[in-house]
Image (cartoon, helix red, strand yellow):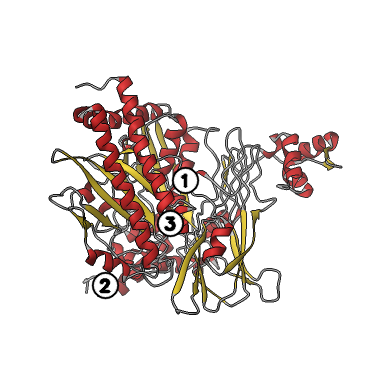
């Protein structure tokens, strides 16, 4: 039967109600604070082909929209009613899993002996084993250091819990009771999905519900293609950087070419640096993965807010990601901090879109979601407690017609701040401050969102703090259309005391009783010429405490006297301010300094020669070339010939390992 438009809307809203009900069950029944309070989880209704038919859009993580789970569903040849599969391994479970702390489950929904769809849920586990508390170690060199690996495994068989699987999980993590509580919340959610879909079948009939799934997927694809057609045809290129690889100061390039052809998009990541010997890698299996397409998702949903939240919105998108590069890493590369790279990929694709749609795209957001984790010893039992303190977000990029959000941006999905009361009740720490930082948003006609500061004090010996994904500590978030770059982030222990230590990026931070650790997130870049910002908007920022009088004068040319705008002085100051001369983007001084030595041409030459060796050797070879170029650049400008000479020496040293001698 054909699904008419009226029935299509009725069905899509019913599907959406199913997943939102699942999400509320997760929110109410999960154990971990980071799940039930901060909402690092999601749910979904999945087609038999592995695509989301519906996905909650106002609760939890939005980063998986567009995912295809067909590889995971095909792992078993047959399923019975009541089966539930669980997995977390990115290499054995296909594109569904992205790092080990994210635990996923799927339950088939049967009717009359036939699978008609699947219920899905995931949570971010606060610990899944591995070398460090919380399981995310930025300096890990292989996935075996990152925790328990689960290929698709039947946790329930025909409704019967497999105790051996439950025990395997419990025996390999630091917080087994919390993890099992979160898994039970997921089981409750997917069981609710089964009940709700059966109710739909009773109301509308099996044929209508099944055909409605395909109709919603096709409808979402049509609307996505309509949004893409509004982008001018052409190829738009952009380069971003991870400012280092977490083990050295060597930057990691992310390069993208965005090609628009009618209602289709091609994202080509050729030229992106090799996978690294740290946890920044993304294992995408070379498919159109939502982690590479978040900026596209954001554009489509912004253009068409009413579009069904279904995986098929990415059907028009094709991705090229060479095997062994940072965004298509190969086993056994570590992947724990993959979301730090996802955010930089977002910025890269956003920058390409800004060229395709001048004036319509926001500036770069803070570009770092850094879940701050505190681990302390229970002094009576000797067992470690592990708790995510705060997701620690930065400011959003300035937007056309609107300032960036303070202490939050679109790349964080619907993650929420963790209530102080919940944290202090579960971890022996005291929160000393958490606020927006004045004078941090990138200047612009519409300024970037302010950075945030978080301070807390520990009191137990052997306290450990980790913070994965700290980025933009050197290379600032870029401004656009005349807007200025934002400010970088940092971490300091015992700030403003004789014992102060500037940590920079946190790896594994060991603290003593009484230590206070302070995190400073980056701010968003500005959008538009700061001279065009309404002086009354500047005055409002000063009154709100977002901007100092001195910064108002310096960055915006607005003079304040007794809380009012001095119009005459403001006109004079603005007339004397130089016009933006940085082109479409302001990357900040530090990127220009870095590219002055490690130039794009030299990077291209390094890419060329590194392609001649296996992926496992490329990161090592890149470090060798980088070190040689830095030595040369101290005396004179380095050239492409220097890259070739350095590589000739490196190949000689590698000859035996490569079987060439």
Displayed quadrant of residue 604: bottom left
Between residues 537 and 517, which one lies in front from this camera angle?
A: 517
Could you tell which of marks 1 and 2 lies nearer the N-terminus?
Answer: 1
Q: Residue 456: x and y, percent?
A: 61, 65
> Helix, strand or loop at disc 1?
loop
The mark found on residue 484 in the picture is none
> Helix, strand or loop at disc 2?
loop
Could you tell which of marks 3 and 1 lies nearer the N-terminus?
Answer: 1
Inter-mark Cα distance, 1 to 2: 48 Å
* Mark closer to the observer (1, 2): 1
Could you tell which of marks 3 and 2 lies nearer the N-terminus?
Answer: 3
Displayed quadrant of residue 16: top left
Residue 63 seen in this snapshot: no
Compared to residue 528, the image places residue 82 above or below, namely below
| Quarter of the figure with the C terminus | bottom left
Between residues 98 and 206, which one lies in front from this camera angle?
A: 206
Between residues 69 and 439, which one lies in front from this camera angle?
A: 69
The mark found on residue 655 in the picture is 2
Residue at 49% over, 59% down = 371
Compared to residue 45, the image places residue 4 above or below, namely above
Q: Residue 197: x and y, percent?
A: 27, 37
For label 1, the crowd category at 10 Å Cα-Cα, with few meaning under 14, some 14 to 19 and many 20 or more, is some
Residue assigned mark 3: 603
Q: Residue 466: x and y, percent?
A: 49, 67
Residue assigned mark 1: 413
């Amino acid at each position: 039967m054909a699904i008419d438009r009226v029935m299509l809307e009725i069905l899509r809203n019913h599907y959406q109600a199913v997943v939102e009900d699942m999400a509320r069950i997760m929110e109410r029944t999960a154990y971990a604070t980071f799940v039930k309070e901060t909402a690092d989880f999601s749910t979904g209704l999945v087609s038999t082909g592995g695509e989301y038919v519906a996905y909650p859009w106002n609760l939890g993580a939005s980063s998986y929209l567009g995912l295809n789970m067909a590889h995971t569903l095909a792992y078993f040849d047959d399923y019975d009613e009541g089966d539930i599969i669980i997995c977390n391994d990115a290499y054995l479970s296909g594109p569904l899993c992205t790092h080990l702390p994210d635990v996923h489950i799927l339950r088939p929904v049967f009717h009359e002996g036939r699978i008609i769809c699947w219920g899905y849920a995931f949570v971010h586990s606060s610990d899944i084993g591995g070398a460090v508390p919380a399981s995310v170690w930025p300096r890990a060199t292989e996935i075996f250091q990152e925790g328990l690996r689960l290929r698709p495994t039947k946790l329930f068989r025909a409704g019967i819990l497999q105790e051996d699987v439950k025990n395997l999980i419990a025996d390999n993590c630091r917080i087994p009771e919390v993890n099992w509580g979160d898994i039970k919340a997921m089981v409750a959610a997917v069981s609710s999905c089964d009940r709700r879909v059966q109710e739909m079948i009773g109301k509308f009939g099996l044929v209508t519900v099944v055909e409605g799934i395909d109709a919603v997927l096709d409808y979402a694809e049509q609307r996505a293609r309509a949004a893409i057609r509004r982008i001018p045809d052409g190829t738009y290129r952009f380069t971003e950087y991870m400012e280092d690889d977490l083990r050295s100061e060597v930057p990691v390039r992310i390069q993208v070419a965005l090609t628009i052809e009618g209602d289709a998009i091609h994202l080509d990541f050729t030229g992106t640096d090799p996978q690294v010997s740290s946890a920044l890698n993304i294992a995408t299996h070379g498919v159109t993965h939502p982690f590479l397409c978040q900026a596209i998702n954001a554009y489509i949903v912004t253009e068409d807010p009413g579009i069904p939240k279904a995986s098929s919105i990415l059907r028009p998108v094709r991705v090229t990601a060479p095997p062994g590069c940072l965004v298509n890493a190969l086993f056994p590369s570590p992947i724990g901090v993959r979301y730090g790279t996802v955010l930089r990929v977002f910025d890269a694709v956003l920058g390409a879109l800004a060229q395709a749609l001048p004036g319509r795209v926001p500036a770069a957001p803070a570009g770092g979601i850094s879940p701050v984790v505190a681990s302390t010893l229970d002094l009576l039992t000797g067992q470690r407690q592990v708790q995510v303190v705060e997701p620690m977000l930065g400011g959003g990029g300035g937007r056309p017609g609107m300032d960036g959000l303070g202490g939050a941006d679109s790349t964080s999905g619907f993650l929420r701040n963790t209530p102080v009361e919940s944290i202090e009740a579960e971890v022996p720490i005291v929160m000393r401050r958490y606020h927006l930082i004045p004078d941090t948003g990138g200047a612009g006609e519409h300024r970037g969102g302010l950075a945030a500061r978080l301070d807390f004090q520990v009191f137990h010996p052997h306290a450990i703090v980790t913070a994965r994904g700290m980025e933009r500590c050197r290379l600032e978030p870029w401004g656009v259309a005349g807007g200025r770059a934002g400010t970088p982030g940092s971490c300091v222990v015992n700030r403003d005391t004789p014992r102060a230590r500037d940590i920079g990026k946190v790896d594994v931070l060991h603290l003593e009783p009484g230590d206070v650790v302070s995190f400073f997130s980056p701010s968003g870049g500005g959008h538009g010429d700061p001279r065009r910002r309404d002086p009354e908007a500047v005055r409002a920022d000063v009154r709100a405490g977002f901007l100092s009088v001195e910064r108002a004068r310096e960055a915006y040319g607005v003079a304040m006297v007794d809380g009012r705008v001095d119009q005459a002085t403001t006109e004079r100051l603005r007339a004397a301010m130089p016009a933006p001369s940085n082109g479409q983007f302001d990357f900040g001084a530090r990127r220009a300094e870095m590219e002055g030595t490690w130039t794009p041409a030299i990077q291209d030459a390094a890419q060329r020669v590194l392609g001649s060796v296996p992926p496992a050797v490329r990161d090592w070879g890149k470090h060798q070339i980088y070190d040689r170029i830095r030595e040369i650049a101290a005396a004179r400008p380095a050239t492409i010939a220097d890259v070739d000479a350095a590589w000739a020496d490196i190949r000689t040293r590698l000859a035996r390992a490569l079987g060439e001698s």
